[in-house]
Image (cartoon, rainbow, N blue to C red):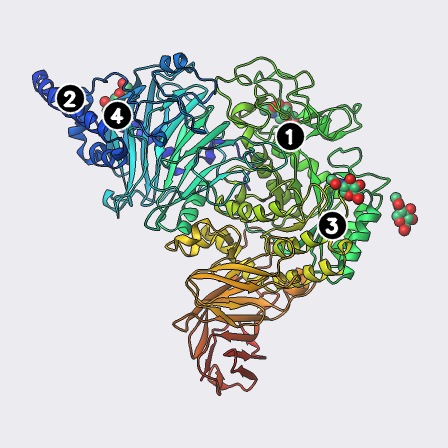
Amino acid sequence: MKLGFWKSEKVKNHESLVENEVLDFHVESTSKVVHKARIFPVWISWILSLVLGIFVILLWILLDLHVDALWSQRQETVAILVDQLEELEFLISATEKTGSSCPYDVEDELKFDCFPQGNADENLCLKRGCCWSFTEKQSVPFCYYPSNYALYSFINVTQLNNSKVNGVVGYLKQTGYSGYPEEIPLLKLMATFETNNRLRVKIVDAMNKRYEVNVLDSLEAEDVLPVHDYDYTFSVNTDITGFSIARKSNQEVIFSTVGVGGFIYANQFLQISSFLPSGNIYGLGEHQDSLRHSTNWQRFALFNHDTVPDKGRNLYGSHPFYLVMENDGLSHGVFLKNSDPMEVILQPTPAITFRALGGIIDFYFFLGPTPQEVIEQYTEVIGRPAMPPYWGLGFHLCRYNYGSLNRTREIWERTRAAGIPFDVQWNDLDYMDTAKDFTYDRNTFAGLPEFVREVHSVGMHYIPLIDPGISNTESKLEYPPYDEGIAMNVFVKNSVDPDALPFVGKVWNTVSTVWPDFTHPNATEYWTNQLKTFHNEVPFDGAWIDMNEPSNFYSGTIDGCPATKWDNPPYTPAVVGDKLCFLTLCMSAGQYGGIHYDLHNLYGFTETIATNFALKQIRGKRPFIISRSTFPGQGHYGGHWSGDVVSDWTNLRRSITSILNYNMFGIPLVGADICGFNGNTTAALCQRWMELGAFYPFSRNHNTDDGIDQDPVALGPAVVEASRKALMVRYMLLPYLYTLFWHAHAHGRTVARPLFFEFPSDRQTYTIDTQFLWGAGLMVAPVLSASTEIIEVYLPRSLWYDFYNLQLISAGGKWTSLPAPLDTIPILLRGGYILPTQAPEVTTALTRVKPFDLLVALNETKQAAGDLYCDDGDTNDAYLLSQFNFIQFEASSNMIKSSVVNWNIESSSSTVRDVTVLGLSDPVSVVTVNGIPHSSFTFNTIKKVLFLKDLKLHLKNPFVISYQ
Ligand SMILES: *[C@@H]1O[C@H](CO)[C@@H](O)[C@H](O)[C@H]1NC(C)=O
Ligand SMILES: *[C@@H]1O[C@H](CO)[C@@H](O)[C@H](O)[C@H]1NC(C)=O
Ligand SMILES: *[C@@H]1O[C@H](CO)[C@@H](O)[C@H](O)[C@H]1NC(C)=O
Ligand SMILES: *[C@@H]1O[C@H](CO)[C@@H](O)[C@H](O)[C@H]1NC(C)=O
């Protein structure tokens, strides 16, 4: 059991490689290169400098004349492979910085903003050593960096290639001033070749330790590989200070800071820009946006904030990760491991700029080359997704302000009575006694413990809302969660001074609120105690952790925030409210792990880690946690819902991008509030939203306190019918969904995925965010507008079968119209895949004891494959402990067979009953099962579908079914 996640022991192998081995390196094996350069007579260097100097000047003139050719020139002329470091040393001595050069004919898209503060004027701009050129065009910066702008130059660069580490270490010294205070005079760049497809580039203060993110549970790094095995090359340019990374297989430069300008490393302003190989950019959360981002001077603030989701706003979580689809269909991903307030700019070059207000530069590059592999590689670093309990994949129902237990029970009962598949009843804030955590209202919610037991007795579960904020004004002994927090010293303080008083703000509590500091070594124990005490009374099954950005009704304290550099940084990203403390804590607040400024974006994540630990302790079972605020690594401990979305068609549509992004962020357990949270839904909207929501990996209908009821029954029979139908499909597909979650847990795959993940060479798929896939084998094509009963769906080249009538729809590669009656969400099966299913019941518990069935959809070559993972659905670490069964299936035009990869438990269900085979050409007249004739089958000659019935095959034993 891991307690104290904040401890530095958690820093794994590859981190220590960077920290220790690289540091040690120049002591043991190095400076061959450096010394060689120094023993040359001075006059040789002089001549070489002269020659190279002339070359550089000629090159510069050339570049001036052909600015638009800069991108390709840059690649050819400036990339210097580390293998040629000897030559590189001469360049170092040759580089006397030529003065700033401000050509007026720089193309707009090559301008990198030198004055993001706004209100730039020419004088201030020139003072920064930048170029000024007025333009009428929207968003194009007036003040931009000259391409030879460099505030740092390399002192030395050393290639490391020993038994422990491969990479490059370089030192950079400051040679100019950016205009930002507290610049770091000496930097150390460490490029570590961690695996064949993962490169880490870390730039730190060479003399002083700075804050670094240290809460991720990475997998162990692989052994160091010989250099020729890496999928990438890393090159430093010491002339125009910068580095670039190329994909070895096709020389595609995936990241290059060379010739961009604007690399700044000041205490509170880290800026780095790079050219990108294509404008197909995904990721960067949490925001509402299209799936593929526009590169039209988009600005994304990454700063966790509680607000009604809309475009352009920084939302609840921060995910400094992006994925690019390159021009030839290959993919890479980039993660900047930094939790400070941040801003990311995309511009049409295409190029990206990161501006972080602190921490260090710590990039991970994942070479893919498929988008799916990028996510697998990313989740190695941030932690693989947790396996949810089986019941957590059922349907969840909640609303803010049922107002009483009676009403909660009434809605719970009427939803079940309507025959809607339903697993988990929730309560929002209103169950609490005056909004105090770990209490329930003894009047309006009298009998809550008994209700929860009743929910359990029918195989269902119960989840309450929990806020991080703790009420702090009860008299002594009246509210132990506060008294114990004080005794254990766990609350966030007014400053980093250990003797400072707790920081006081206010959320829902009647007077005021303090917040546990989840980086404090006592916090996990404190939190576990509180949850345990409450659980002894109300035996809840999971945790819904809300308001953990953290949200605050004040901006700082009731009196605001002290004037410090943390709340008044030299640059503030484009955040909602225009100041960092807006409706959250003061940035100067003190946590055990450091200043809140650095840790703000980790608050919800660290709360999730503590909650995960607590739930394991308390229930002894797999935790189910949904958090509003997130950071990379969240998926390892819990899931997410997309917050307080508005009940309208726009938000219905945007919810798809949001679940796809979170799958890319390694948090597959994600959903939006079905039918919308804020505002009043309508029956028409809620009907379509229930249909789509049945295919969110986390499926919950939830509503605000002042909206009309939106549980399906409240909205009438049409909504009930559509909900029941869609959720029946979900429950039928649970074995497939659960197996997808296992693939996420074990291998880092996505559960819900964009079309381009499966069809990366089909460029048509790059912008599609109105449809999505579950795994590789199932397409979900929801209706996203009112009064629509026919939809246009893009079907990539593949065979696609209608899920409902099993008919072949099209050979794909084009847009196709599909009927979508009001009560039906179009679902398609993809040829080539076998999906395990079960006859749906109204709870997951009842469904899981049914025999399995197989849906076999053959592809063009009459083949299909699939698999099935089963465990008991609730044991912690079942996979790790090998307490699971895993079966693979394969089919062709005349047979289906299974292979048993792992069989270690008695499953609640262990037989295959029916098998349906789609896409056969010839009628079937004879069927044998393990060599014995089987007569219970039919063949539909119109649809070309074979229905095999009553097979009663035990999954423990491999089987072969033949048909002709
Ligand atoms: C590179 O320069 C740094 C800073 O001056 C120095 O500490 C380091 O030892 C040098 N490394 C080599 C290999 O010379
Ligand atoms: C809840 O319902 C029960 C029985 O229907 C009733 O006795 C009780 O007064 C109700 N409680 C509230 C708070 O409405
Ligand atoms: C943890 O709590 C104990 C009391 O239970 C207290 O004595 C100790 O100082 C706390 N630790 C820290 C680091 O504050
Ligand atoms: C929702 O409908 C209710 C009842 O008609 C009304 O009182 C309320 O103001 C509406 N809320 C919004 C946000 O329109």
Residue furthest to the front: 136
User: Residue 240 got which mark?
Assistant: 4
Q: Which residue is mark 1?
A: 551
- Residue 59: x and y in percent read 18, 27
Q: Amino acid at mark 2?
A: Gly
Q: CA distance from mark 2 to mark 3?
A: 72 Å
Helix, strand or loop at mark 2: helix
User: Residue 710 got which mark?
Assistant: 3
- Residue 780: x and y in percent read 55, 58
Q: CA distance from mark 4 to mark 2?
A: 13 Å
**Circle 4: is it few (<14), some (14-19), or many (20+) Cα within 10 Å?**
many
Q: Is residue 226 visible from the viewing direction of this image? A: yes
| Left or right position of 3 against 830 | right
Q: Which residue is mark 2?
A: 53
Question: Which residue is at 51% across, 22% downward?
Answer: 572
- Residue 921: x and y in percent read 44, 79
Asked if the residues shown at circle 3 and circle 1 are in contact, with their CB atoms under 8 angstroms apart, the answer is no
Tell me if residue 933 comes above or below residue 586 in the rendering: below
Q: Which of the two labelled residues, at mark 4 and mark 2, occupies the earlier sequence position?
A: 2
Quarter in which the N terminus is drawn: top right
